[in-house]
Image (spheres, rainbow, N blue to C red):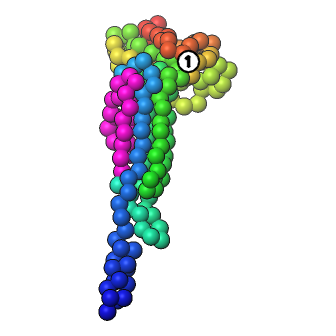
């Protein structure tokens, strides 16, 4: 009789499993408070300079196998090129993400009274302009910031009338801003 109860208890424990923690630590190793991260396509969450955020997840561990938790993290910000990391976390896993400054920024300002910037192309110097980086136009007196790795870049701007502006060999350095102000001809 006791063996029967032990077998039943063992079967229940095998089926139910036990919960264990998995964690991710995100550390803003920059001097800037304009750093953000986003989980699983959620809203961006700001993280202050030199702050660590610890995220804990319950993951179930069974005797014969373990559940995993899928996590998609995107981060970026002031002088940080946006990056995406995907993890399958198992019980006991611990992951660290350190965010460092690795970029400068190019700011495109629309100084026009009545024109919109419909397309912006930024490529490494000498490369072909292929992908429009705008999802929405830059209206009069608006601007858009692009984080870029240090180096030489070419810029192409197309406004709503089809006028094209080209700038070549723009040097972007780490933790520095370069601004282009568009005005119609």
- Residue displayed at 45% across by 21% down: 30
Of all residues, the one furthest to the bottom in this rendering is: 1
Quadrant in the picture for residue 29: top left
Q: Is residue 49 left or right of residue 152?
A: left
In the rendered view of the protein, which quadrant contains the N terminus?
A: bottom left
- For the record, the magenta segment spans 36-57
The crowd level at tag 1 (other Cα within 10 Å; few <14, some 14-19, many 20+) is many
Counting labels gives 1
- Residue displayed at 39% across by 13% down: 110
Of all residues, the one furthest to the front in this rendering is: 2
- Label 1 sits on a secondary structure element that is strand
Q: Nearer the viewer, residue 32 or 27?
A: 27
Q: Is residue 29 left or right of residue 127?
A: left
Q: Which residue is mark 1?
A: 155
Q: Nearer the viewer, residue 178 or 91?
A: 91
Residue 121 visible in the displayed image: yes
Residue 137 visible in the displayed image: no
Q: Position of residue 115 (x, y in %)?
A: 38, 16
Residue 118: in magenta span: no
Up-down relation of residue 113 to residue 91 (above or below):
above
- Residue displayed at 54% across by 31% down: 131
Q: Nearer the viewer, residue 91 or 173?
A: 91
Up-down relation of residue 154 to residue 75 (above or below):
above
Q: Position of residue 118 (x, y in %)?
A: 43, 24
Q: Position of residue 98 (x, y in %)?
A: 48, 32
- Residue displayed at 48% across by 12% down: 177
């Amino acid at each position: 009789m006791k063996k029967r109860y032990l077998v039943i208890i063992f079967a229940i424990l095998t089926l139910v499993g036990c919960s264990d923690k998995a964690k991710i630590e995100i550390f803003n190793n920059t001097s800037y408070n304009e750093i953000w991260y986003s989980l699983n396509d959620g809203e961006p969450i700001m993280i202050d300079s030199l702050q660590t955020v610890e995220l804990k997840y319950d993951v179930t561990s069974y005797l014969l196998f373990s559940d995993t938790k899928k996590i998609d993290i995107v981060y970026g910000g002031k002088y940080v090129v946006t990056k995406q990391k995907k993890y399958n976390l198992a019980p006991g896993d611990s992951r660290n993400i350190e965010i460092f400054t690795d970029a400068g920024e190019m700011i495109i300002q629309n100084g026009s009274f009545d024109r919109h910037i419909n397309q912006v192309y930024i490529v490494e110097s000498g490369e072909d302009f292929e992908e429009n980086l705008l999802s929405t136009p830059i209206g009069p007196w608006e601007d858009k910031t692009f984080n870029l790795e240090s180096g030489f870049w070419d810029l192409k701007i197309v406004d709503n009338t089809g006028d094209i502006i080209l700038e070549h060999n723009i040097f972007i350095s780490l933790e520095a801003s370069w601004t282009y102000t568009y005005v119609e001809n």
